[in-house]
Amino acid sequence: KCRSMAFPDQRASTALARSGPATDSLAAGLRRDLWRPGLRCASFSSPGILMKYSRPSSENKICPPAELAQRLAALPHPLVFTNGCFDILHRGHVTYLGQARALGAAMIVALNTDASVKRQGKGDERPINPLEDRAAVMAALGCVDLVTWFDEDTPLTRILECRPDILVKGGDWPVDRIVGHAEVMGWGGSVHSIPFEVERSTTALLGKIKAL
């Protein structure tokens, strides 16, 4: 594996910072001569040479609703489904999401679109983060296997499409008020309202920030 390279002296590092045919040749030699087992390697570039970096692999978890059927077929069961705005991710969110994922073999999270969030009455400034950002952050969590979204006021359409074995919401939602509970239990699934172990809220967090 390639590890970061440690420069043995300031002269080498200074030479690599310059550009031009001579110094580019020196840089190539230093790449060869400075590599030793146990050292770490650095990426070198001259002005005008752009390095290309791949997108985070976690973003492959982001799934448009139109592609759900194909992507769901690859997920193991029992399948967990949860949903929410997840505008500013905090400890309460990740604790709850980790507990939800532990109930099954894979978990899909459906996010409210920006328009859907605005209809929730959370305030004119919400969401703080647009859907594409919220989806990327959610997808980066190890406990999440797939991220999609819904533009309606409720996720019922996504629930019917996903047919999860386990439907989960936070403890502020009694089971009989969780959207989709009747449908999921009707096809033999279970519904969980997970009590909050870490009391945090995005609204309270924003209030604290504004008060600074």
Image: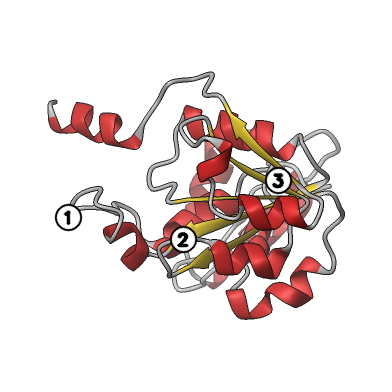
Q: Residues within 10 Å of mark 1 (few under 14, many from 20)?
A: few
- Marks 1/2: CA distance? 19 Å
Badge 3 element: loop
Left or right of 190 in this view: 91: left
Instruction: Say which residue label 1 marks.
Output: 124
The mark that comes first in sequence, 1 or 2, is: 1
Identified by mark 1, the residue type is: Asp
- Where's residue 136, x and y in %? 52, 57
Task: Determine the residue positioned at 40% across, 25% down.
Answer: 200
* Quadrant in the rendering for residue 56: bottom right
Q: Nearer the viewer, mark 1 or mark 2?
A: 2
Task: Determine the residue positioned at 49% across, 37% down.
Answer: 173
The mark that comes first in sequence, 3 or 2, is: 3
Q: Which disc number belongs to residue 154?
A: 2
Task: Determine the residue positioned at 56% across, 41% down.
Answer: 176
Left or right of 179 in this view: 34: right
Identified by mark 2, the residue type is: Thr
Identified by mark 3, the residue type is: Cys
- Marks 3/1: CA distance? 49 Å
For the question of whether residue 5 can be seen, the reply is no
- Between 40 and 99, the residue placed more toward the observer is 99
In the displayed structure, 199 sits above or below 157; it is above
Badge 2 element: loop
- Marks 3/2: CA distance? 50 Å
Q: How crowded is mark 2: few (under 14 residues within 10 Å), some or many (20 or more)?
A: some
In the displayed structure, 115 sits above or below 197; it is below
Instruction: Say which residue label 3 marks.
Output: 41
